[in-house]
Image (cartoon, rainbow, N blue to C red):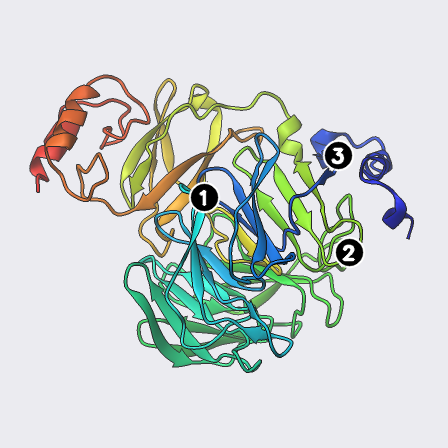
């Protein structure tokens, strides 16, 4: 109970003191807790680098919502006239945030049938198409073509919404089949294009959104993992790790490899302690969220009750204390699937990893956008790397990603946002066609130019090969 009575700075000091001789290079370090601009029940990192966070209404009809700028520490209110508390949400290919459902007045858990979109550029909300019925506690899954599946949630009568729906940006929402899933189900896109359902139920299935068919995969060794979590293992987007849970409270973990011909859950090393959430400076449980920032820090905020509701913290992981950081000097703004591209990295010879990490969209222990994709790369010159983009949208759905380079000591550069998708070969300006402007941009950039958009073959310079690519693909 003492922790409830200690103010933010004192509590931070007491936690750091309790770490003993272990320095920040081993355990990391927390910044002093800060008064937060909102109860961060829903958090989404945008391609502007700002974090959109929202909760339930705070005196008006719409949810409290703010933009947090991690570089300045400023909070900017962004008014939304709808109660989108307990909605599902995910980022679209153009960087906008798509929000499905929310809370309506009436019975205790009545879902909202509306959708909304948030534009990071204008920092404003707009109305989207209506779903067939309400959803409270739904899960969104972005597919390889950029469409979004919407599962579960309570409808306008406070009963489970079993209708699966698919949102096509610029077109609308199409109903698919029927499936009874728990609230905020845990679902992940596989490289096959299937969506695997991995909890909290103990029986797990793969879903084909094109045929609307479900296939039984396996059942967990533990059973139900209430309040636990599942994640795609970094670098292996077809392996799922399930950890923890509270029914019963457990420290166990297991892995399902969906790339295997016969996928089965295999136990792996347990956590040191049974837990539903890891400990922070403030104790945080229900309605807390965490967000990885492009500079490698982690925002921790939100909570259901107690003094931490309107306090947030930033965690500095150990890798930020292991020496000088490499520099990611230049990257192209857009990268097409399965194509090479160059990066300007002065410390190119020390780089051990190049990876894409999808921006966080997290609530209620469900990160709808969670994905880490390793990229193959090579050093082609001093200060120049050539990497290859993910094979297709099933490996990395279209949208903005944080591009990280990491040195041999595990120290990351500050990430830059890159838009992943499909553009015609030779389309330098990103307008979907290859024409005179692309031709002129090639001539304008006719120099060594690692990370340039006009470097179409990823060799670190703009030259005759890039010029010919534009000519051969003229449209």
Residue 273 circle label? 2
Residue of label 1: 123
Q: Residue at x 53, y 53 (%)?
A: 233
**Is 440 above or below relative to 239?**
above
Q: Using residue 77 as the reference point, say whether residue 300 is left or right of it.
A: right
Quick check: 244 left or right of 233?
right
Q: Vertically, is 457 above or below 270?
A: above
Label of residue 148 in the image: none
Looking at the picture, tell me which residue is in the foreground, 375 or 161: 161
Circle 2 Cα neighbour tier, 10 Å, few/some/many (<14 / 14–19 / ≥20) = few
Q: x, y percentage for residue 469? A: 13, 34
Of tags 3 and 1, the one toward the viewer is 1
Measured as percent of width and height from the top left, residue 330 is found at: 38, 25
Image quadrant assignment for residue 62: bottom right
- Marks 2 and 1 sit apart, C-alpha to C-alpha, by 41 Å
Q: Look at 40% across and 41% down and name the residue there.
A: 121
In-front residue for pair 274/297: 297
Which of label 3 and label 2 is nearer to you? Answer: 3
The local secondary structure at tag 2 comes to loop
393 or 179: nearer the viewer: 179
Report x, y in % for residue 472: 8, 37
- Is residue 221 visible in the rendered image? The answer is yes
Q: Which of marks 2 and 1 is in front?
A: 1
Q: Which residue corresponds to mark 3?
A: 32
N-terminal of the two: label 3 or label 2?
3
Quadrant of residue 440 within the rendered picture: top left
With 246 as the anchor, is 116 left or right in this view?
left
């Amino acid at each position: 109970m003492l922790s409830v009575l200690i103010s933010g700075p004192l509590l931070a000091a007491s936690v750091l003191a309790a770490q003993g001789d272990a320095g920040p290079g081993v355990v990391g370090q927390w910044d002093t807790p800060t008064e937060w601009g909102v109860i961060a029940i829903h958090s989404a990192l945008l391609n502007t680098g700002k974090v959109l966070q929202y909760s339930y209404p705070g005196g008006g009809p719409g949810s409290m919502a703010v933009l947090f700028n991690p570089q300045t520490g400023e909070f900017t209110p962004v008014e939304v006239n709808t109660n989108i508390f307990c909605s599902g949400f995910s980022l679209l290919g153009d960087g906008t945030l798509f929000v499905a459902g929310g809370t309506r007045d009436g019975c205790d858990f009545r879902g909202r049938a509306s959708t909304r979109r948030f534009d990071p550029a204008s920092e404003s909300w707009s109305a989207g198409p209506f779903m067939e019925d309400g959803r409270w506690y739904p899960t969104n899954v972005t597919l390889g073509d950029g469409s979004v599946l919407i599962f579960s949630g309570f409808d306008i009568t406070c009963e489970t919404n079993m209708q699966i729906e698919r949102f096509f940006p610029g077109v609308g929402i199409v109903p698919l089949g029927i499936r009874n899933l728990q609230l905020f189900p845990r679902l992940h896109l596989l490289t096959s294009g299937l969506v695997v359902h991995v909890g909290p139920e103990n029986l797990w299935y793969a879903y084909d959104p094109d045929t609307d068919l479900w296939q039984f995969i396996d059942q967990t060794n533990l059973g139900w993992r209430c309040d636990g979590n599942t994640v795609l293992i970094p670098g292996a987007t077809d392996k799922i790790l399930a950890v923890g849970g509270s029914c019963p409270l457990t420290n166990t973990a297991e892995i399902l490899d969906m790339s295997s011909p016969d996928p089965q859950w295999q136990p792996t090393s347990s956590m040191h302690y049974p837990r539903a959430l890891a400990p922070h400076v403030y104790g945080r449980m229900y309605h807390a969220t965490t967000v990885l920032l492009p500079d490698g820090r982690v925002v921790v905020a939100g909570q259901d009750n107690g003094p931490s509701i309107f306090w947030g913290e930033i965690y500095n992981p150990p890798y930020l204390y292991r020496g000088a950081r490499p520099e990611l000097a230049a990257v192209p703004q857009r990268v097409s699937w399965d194509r090479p591209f160059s990066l300007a990295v002065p410390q190119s010879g020390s780089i051990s990893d190049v990876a894409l990490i999808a921006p966080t969209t997290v609530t209620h222990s469900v990160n709808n956008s969670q994905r880490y994709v390793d990229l193959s790369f090579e050093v082609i010159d001093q200060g120049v790397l050539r990497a290859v983009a993910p094979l297709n949208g099933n490996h990395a759905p279209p949208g903005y990603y944080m591009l990280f380079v990491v040195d041999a000591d595990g120290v990351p550069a500050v990430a830059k946002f890159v838009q992943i998708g499909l553009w015609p070969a030779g389309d330098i300006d990103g307008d979907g066609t290859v024409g005179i402007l692309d031709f002129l941009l090639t001539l304008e950039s006719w120099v060594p130019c690692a990370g340039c958009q006009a470097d179409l073959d990823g060799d670190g310079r703009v030259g005759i090969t890039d010029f010919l690519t534009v000519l051969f693909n003229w449209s």
